Image (cartoon, rainbow, N blue to C red):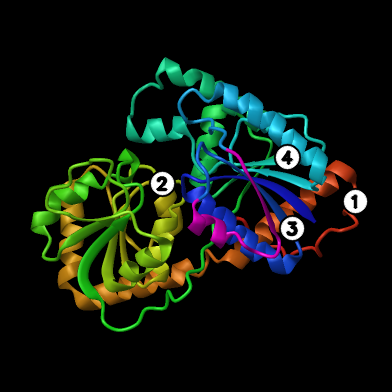
């Protein structure tokens, strides 16, 4: 089977695409990755995608949520249609929205990793400004034009339906992650860590700065801050994945009091590395981590401080919470994610053609979309 999959070079979608492609390799699924995002892949990103089942096609076309993307969206639409004509994939797997209604010959699925409208609702808590209405209309058209819609959590799927109307054939497939060398070794350092797009208001890292002086341990953040002032917090700056993995194995606690996080790969990475988790008490994180993490209201610094004080002072509780997080993380495995997508690819092909393609993979074992 051959899948034409879009990706971008500017966010967590790239990590997801590489992890998924790697897990699809044993299922004999070829992945043609069409990269957009307004910037080229880094050497490290390109190296990560050197897999036997992956072919890369790069572009500098803007994504739908970037500034004034409309001319680029027209050009990237023609580029994608040209790639389909050239490569003849069995399925189109879009990790963005606006091209879901293109006249592809193969069945089309759209994965809603996040969207501006649901981000705005959760973070700004005001009406969507008029300048984003064109974006919302384009996303709605892309969703309605697709043959299937996937989200990485039931909470995100519900948000898509709430903002864009009834969805076509829809499914939740949780993201998966495997970190080489993630097995915890040795004693943990007395450190509270956060990581990701620190500048993004959705991550809500400023709350850690507010209460850092009341936490017995140092608080550190890894990622690009874009000038965000975080007094009392140690800034580690942007780290390569292997560098971040080292910090995750050192830190005893990972804290991200997020306001909006449709899945949260950094949280999963921290759980795999053996950190106790403190995350925002929002629908997606309750769905994913309830019972395996401390859940704190995103806008309650007192609750955040109390949770971190409790975990730093109570070693047995901290150890138990870290173990619970690792057990829960095992549910979000790459092979399970790949099985979910392989099942969906085959279902879309059956619906479109009434048969399996001659070069398809063997049907993957059925897995439940939700846990």
**Left or right position of 366 against 172:** right
Q: Quick check: can you spot residue 292?
A: no
Q: Residue at x 13, y 55 (%)?
A: 212
Vertically, is 159 above or below 242? Answer: above
Horizontal relation, residue 347 to residue 162: left or right:
right
Q: Residue at x 72, y 52 (%)?
A: 344
Residue that label 4 marks: 108
**Rendered residue at 52%/29% (across/down):** 163
Q: Closer to the observer: label 3 or label 4?
A: 3
Dot 1 and dot 3 residues touching (CB under 8 Å):
no
- From this view, report whether residue 365 is shown above or below residue 230: below
Secondary structure under badge 2?
loop
Which-is-in-front pick, marks 4 and 1?
Answer: 4
Q: CA distance from mark 4 to mark 1?
A: 16 Å
Residue 106 image position (x, y, % from top left) = 80, 41
**Residue linked to disc 3:** 30
| Residue position for label 2 | 261
* Distance CA(mark 3)–CA(mark 2): 30 Å
Q: For mark 3, give the secondary structure.
A: strand
Q: x%, y% of residue 65? A: 49, 31
- Indicate which disc, 4 or 2, sits on the residue closer to the N terminus: 4
* Segment colored magenta: 42-59
> Residue tagged by mark 1?
355
Give the image location of residue 85, x and y in percent: 82, 38
Mark 1 lies on a secondary structure that is loop
């Amino acid at each position: 089977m051959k899948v034409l999959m879009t990706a971008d070079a500017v966010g967590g979608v790239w990590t997801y695409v590489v992890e998924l492609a790697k897990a699809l390799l044993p299922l004999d699924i070829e992945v043609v990755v069409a990269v957009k995002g307004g910037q080229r892949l880094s050497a490290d990103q390109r190296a990560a995608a050197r897999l036997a089942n992956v072919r890369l096609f790069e572009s500098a076309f803007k994504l739908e949520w970037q500034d004034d993307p409309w001319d680029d969206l027209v050009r990237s639409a023609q580029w994608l249609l040209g790639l389909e004509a050239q490569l003849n994939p069995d399925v189109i797997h879009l990790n963005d929205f606006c091209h879901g209604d293109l006249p592809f010959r193969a069945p089309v699925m759209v994965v809603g990793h996040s969207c501006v409208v649901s981000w705005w609702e959760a973070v700004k808590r005001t009406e969507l400004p008029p300048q984003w209405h064109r974006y919302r209309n384009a996303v709605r058209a892309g969703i309605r034009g697709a043959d299937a819609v996937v989200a990485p959590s039931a909470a995100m799927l519900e948000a898509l339906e709430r903002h864009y109307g009834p969805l076509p054939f829809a499914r939740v497939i949780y993201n998966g992650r495997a970190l080489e060398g993630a097995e915890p070794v040795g004693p943990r350092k007395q450190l509270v860590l956060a990581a990701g797009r620190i500048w993004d208001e959705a991550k809500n890292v400023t709350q850690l700065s507010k209460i850092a002086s009341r936490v017995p341990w140092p608080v550190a953040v890894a990622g690009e801050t874009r000038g965000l002032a975080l007094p009392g917090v140690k800034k580690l700056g942007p780290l390569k994945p292997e560098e971040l993995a080292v910090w995750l194995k050192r830190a005893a606690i990972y804290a991200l009091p997020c306001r909006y996080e449709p899945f949260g790969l950094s949280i999963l990475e921290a759980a795999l590395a053996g950190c106790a988790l403190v995350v925002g008490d929002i629908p997606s994180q309750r769905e994913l981590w309830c019972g395996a993490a401390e859940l704190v209201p995103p806008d309650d610094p007192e609750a955040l401080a109390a949770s971190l004080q409790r975990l730093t002072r109570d070693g047995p509780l901290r150890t138990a919470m870290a173990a619970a997080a690792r057990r829960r993380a095992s549910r979000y495995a790459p092979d399970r994610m790949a099985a979910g997508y392989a099942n969906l690819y085959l279902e879309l092909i059956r619906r479109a053609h009434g048969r399996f393609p001659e070069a398809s993979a063997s049907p993957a074992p059925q897995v439940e979309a939700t846990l």
